[in-house]
Image (cartoon, rainbow, N blue to C red):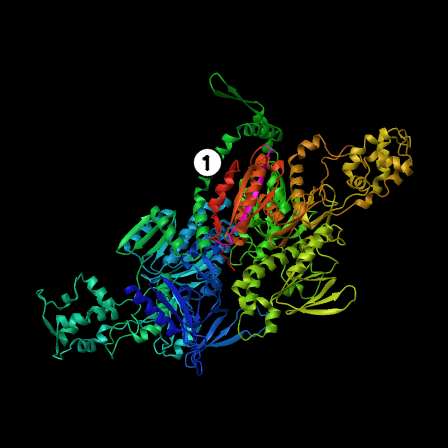
Amino acid sequence: MTILSSFFNRASNAIHAYPSCSKLLILCTISSGGLVAYSESQAEPGTPREEEKKKKVLVLGTGWAGTSFLKDINVSHYDVQVISPRNYFAFTPLLPSVTCGTVEARSIVEPVRNIIKKRDGEVQFCEAECVKIDAAGKRVYCQSNIESNLVGNKEFSLEYDYLVIAVGAQVNTFNTPGVQENCHFLKEIEDAQKIRGTVIDCFEKAVLPGLSEEERKTNLHFVIVGGGPTGVEFAAELHDYIQEDLVNLYPMAKDIVKITMIQSGDHILNTFDERISSFAENKFQRDGIEILTGRRVVNVSEKEVAMKIKSTGESCSIPHGIVLWSTGVGTRPVIKDFMEQIGQKNRRALATDEWLKVKGCDNVYALGDCASIDQRKIMEDIATIFEAADKDNSGTLTVKEFQDVLDDIIIRYPQVELYLKSMHMSDVTNLFEDPRGTNATEVDIEGFKSALSHVDSQMKSLPATAQVAAQQGEYLSRCFNRMEQCEQNPEGPRRFRGSGRHQFRPFCYKHFGQFAPLGGEQTAAELPGDWVSMGHSTQWLWYSVYARIDIMIISCIQQASKLADEGISGIRLVEKIYFRERFKPYLRRQFYEKATRAFRERSLLSKVLIIGTVSGGGLVALSDSGAFQRKNGAEECKKKKVVVLGTGWAGTSFLKNLKDNSYEVQVVSPRNYFAFTPLLPSVTNGTVEARSIVEPIRNIMRKKGMEVQFKEAECYKIDADNRKIHCRTNGSSNLGGKEEFTLDYDILVVAMGARANTFNTPGVVEHAHFLKEVEDAQKIRRTVIDCFERASLPSLTDEERKRILHFVVVGGGPTGVEFAAELHDLVVEDLPRLYPAVKDFVKITLLEAGGSILSMFDKRITAFAENKFQRDGIDLKMGSMVVKVSDKQISTKDRVTGQLSSIPYGMVVWSTGIGTRPVIADFMKQIGQDNRRVLATDEWLRVEGYDNVYALGDCATINQRKVMEDISAIFSKADKNNTGKLNLKDFKEVIKDICERYPQVELYLKKKQLKNFDVLLKNAVGDPKKEAMELDIEKFTKALSEVDSQMKFLPATAQVAAQEGAYLADCLNRSEQCEKYPEGPLRFRGTGRHRFHPFRYKHLGQFAPLGGEQTAAQLPGDWVSIGHSTQWLWYSVYARNTRTKKGQVLMQCTPMIGCFSERALITCRLSISKLNSLQGLIKQYNPMKTTFILTPVPERILAETITFSSEFTWLEAYLGFNDAETCPDAAMKLKYCQLFTDEILVSTQTITQASDG
């Protein structure tokens, strides 16, 4: 009966809740257990009742309070809009960890639109800042902070019925002079990232030449003002970062780094238990962190922090390299203005009642750090409480009368319960005990006042923490969800100043404890119930709690991967042991190969012979006695100074391959990392994270056995005559030391790359984005989101939205095409789910001045790419030359008709080739190459005219010598008898040298399909069958007259630069050896041979990702591959070429997490003999829409990675889970695959997509 009653009650409520719909009556026929559905054909006659209009709820802010409110609000009852200048939620307790790289920024954020998407799009979001609140007119005024070149009105206003203010607070500077200008704060993600960059800048500046010891100490003095949880955690993270990581990269700075914490109070962490505060201070002292307590900062200049000692009033100051200000919260300007309107001018934060309602505004609520609950004092209502409890109006209260209102008192005045707890009273009646401990049976008004007179002393303001804000947001959303229900049936306490009950119970904060990470894998925790925990075990409790609270599943995975870094070495050890057991023969052979190579390459060292004595199992070491003499001679020989300019592909490849210790190497570059530039287009749209494609240069230096010094600076002048380079630093000006310095060199390696070529087009530099650096990719990524956020703002016309969401790519080369493809995937697959209202306004246009895109690729790839882009809706405009770029329009000129046209845009990306850097242009003028586009070098990469200056990569090109320039010298060198005629025998002695010195000869033979050089000469005579022939100089010249037509410049690609760097390093490694024994071709214009073989580029193929998980590849041997399988070949090749193991893992994991939705990847090793059985399995599972793609792998790769047998191939299986009910889980599919596999190499797991916007 209870179940039936509940059923009919719910059915009745459903009918009353939807009067405009036809009533659905469900009759339960108990006899047969069936269901009969009946519906009225139409509504009752008369005017249909209009659906009640939803009330507008406007939420300001996307912090802890605002996000918690949004996640729980019932959007079916309200029209919810959100206004915030940031379109993401940040897990702020982990900001100190972001500053030092313990946790990545993306691991602690979730896009607000992801939260909105989960609410079925019924919440609207605008990325803007509220600048004014008009409580009387129920309106807020907002302003967009997105770049001004985006069209549309930046200011707008919104009406509301209910306003939820959750804008948080800003840093409290206490009006201290210099804080805003010279200090860092830690409130936002951007703050943490800025601090991270500044810390590295301090170290880079400290290791520059020309600085005194005092200046280095100043640069490396880190000052934290404020000893609260944020300041303490940052100090701990910074200490670990310096001691565990940075001192390994900057060893000379190890003994001069200092961290100082300034606290105005007597102890740090004064909001924690005294035991924790004492433990933290002792640990910091052991770690060498200086703590200055009882001092108040009075001024912060560029280089000093001035303080006043509170106890004595004395003034003092300390120098600094960076200052973090973390001293509490202050009021935001918009809140100050609002407080003046409502008469709260003199308060620190908005005053609210216990129901979070702003005092004086019934429809405005304030949560989080911007507000404070003004708890009502019990003594203010003592008379009304007594009157309400005294039901018989006797003037006295009995214990029973008091107990009748006790529950309402405790709920309405929580300080009562706190007071009882502080006084160790078990019952409230203990308040009425007389001095002898006897309970009074009755109490009058004066006795009642006396009993409760000290209760209000327990009133405390809630702390400005994430816990409080999150609970307030959850509480307020629960009130909103039950507003109608509680209107009829109030659930709050009794109204002592009035009749009835309050609609809701007042907000009650429940403290769950707090953590204080102290570094060194140690954390202190203050838990509910006065529990205190400190040490390593508490660190893992901190990890687990924060990972559990974090909103995003992917964030948890990323944090877990961070925590697992400590166990990587153990995993590698197990993997290494397994590898050794399985491949002992291969490893043994590898050992002997390495030993042989070591003897050959280390010829200057004494040869050490290790003889194993089998009988005793001992080792006898024999060393040449002359070793000491050679060692002393080597020390006396001064090392040559090699200066490398640039840390791109060429410079990094040179550094990684240089092994000769006879060089003193110094590297100068404005960026202290190497970037895997082919993946920059993928970074722009989040397919790959920036950290996945970079490696610190100091990591590369540390791994080398030789000493390499790095200077983070920019070379602005090369003085080749005096063998000097002039450099300037790009660091902050407040860091001490000289901004400019010079370096001498014996050998200079110029590998500075190139900049984007604008062709002097007006407006390009000012308004266009480029894609040459990691910073460029990140800026583009932010701008794309800004365009969508701006287009989503109200008050914009459809024409303005179309203009804002028009993305223009100038340049149809590999970079432009790949970016356009990546952008298309982003705006089609991801962003429409986050911005459904503007998805139809998006347009992508690609402008190309030539006749086709990807003109350097095979024509089949070009045609496929153009057709795919047309199918995808990407507008291709061929033959369109850009003549001007303004802030809102691009002016183009048709190369055929000359017609001018204008294209409106929201963002333009310029990718039209490379141009010369200013320092290279200046150097070219010095050496007489001012009419060239890049530096000209010979075939040995030497700058023409300077034997000790080499140029690699995009800043240089090889000026290949023509055969016809040396035709007489070649003939003379071959004509040893000086007869004036040559036969085939004479030629055979120099043919190899000719082909090596002039590579165009071999290219010409290949083009003409000639078997060898002999056939070329015979054809010149006119009788190919004639064996005995002779050629004079005229016939010889005629035979080779067309050879130089095959001369081609090398492309400006990463492949070329990397190979040039490796080649030059190999030459320098063998410089002394090749000086004695030259290995190059004959010198036709001189005697002897060249020292080295000339540089020869080996083309390994090129890729062109085209979006939609499709890639085109042009491989060696005129092979062309296009499609989905090529995409995974692209992934694997690029992951393999990524410089670090960490980068390889991230490269492989990022596309899976970012692109797969409910999909599993299985990689198996299959025997050829079982392939037919597997194909039967594929057919069997065809109803599941399972797709298997077989990808053969070259035997060489198999030998290097998995096995030496050639009877295996790889299987990559993509299992699409379209319907969970009809598809078996991944484990079942894996089980069936195991029936036909020799070994499962990679286990399967399901990855759920969680786009980060």
Q: Judge by depth and name the residue closer to the eye, 549 or 135.
A: 549
Q: Confirm whether residue 963 shows in the render.
A: yes
> What residue is at 64 percent from the left and 70 percent from the top?
888
Task: Identify whether 62 is placed above or below 641.
Answer: below
Where residue 985 sits in the image (x, y, percent)?
A: 85, 28
Q: How many marks?
A: 1
Where residue 570 sits in the image (x, y, percent)?
A: 44, 39
Q: Judge by depth and name the residue closer to the eye, 523 or 1177.
A: 1177
Q: Is residue 659 a member of the stretch shown in magenta?
A: no
Name the residue tied to disc 1.
574
Horizontal side, residue 985 vs residue 571: left or right = right
Where residue 522 sits in the image (x, y, percent)?
A: 36, 48
Q: Confirm whether residue 178 shows in the render.
A: no
Q: Residue at the far bottom: name it.
A: 46
Residue span colored magenta: 1205-1219
Q: Judge by depth and name the residue closer to the eye, 812 or 1138.
A: 812
Horizontal side, residue 192 vs residue 489: left or right = right
Task: Identify whether 120 is placed above or below 193.
Answer: below
Residue 918 sits in quarter: bottom right
Residue 889 sits in quarter: bottom right
Q: Which corner quadrant holds the N terminus?
A: bottom left
Horizontal side, residue 579 vs residue 540: left or right = right
Task: Identify whether 625 is placed above or below 682.
Answer: above
Q: Judge by depth and name the residue closer to the eye, 55 or 675.
A: 55
Query: SS at mark 1?
Result: helix
**Residue type at numbered disc 1:** Val
Which is the main secondary structure of the residues drawn in magenta? strand
Where residue 154 sits in the image (x, y, percent)?
A: 54, 73
Q: Is residue 1212 a member of the stretch shown in magenta?
A: yes
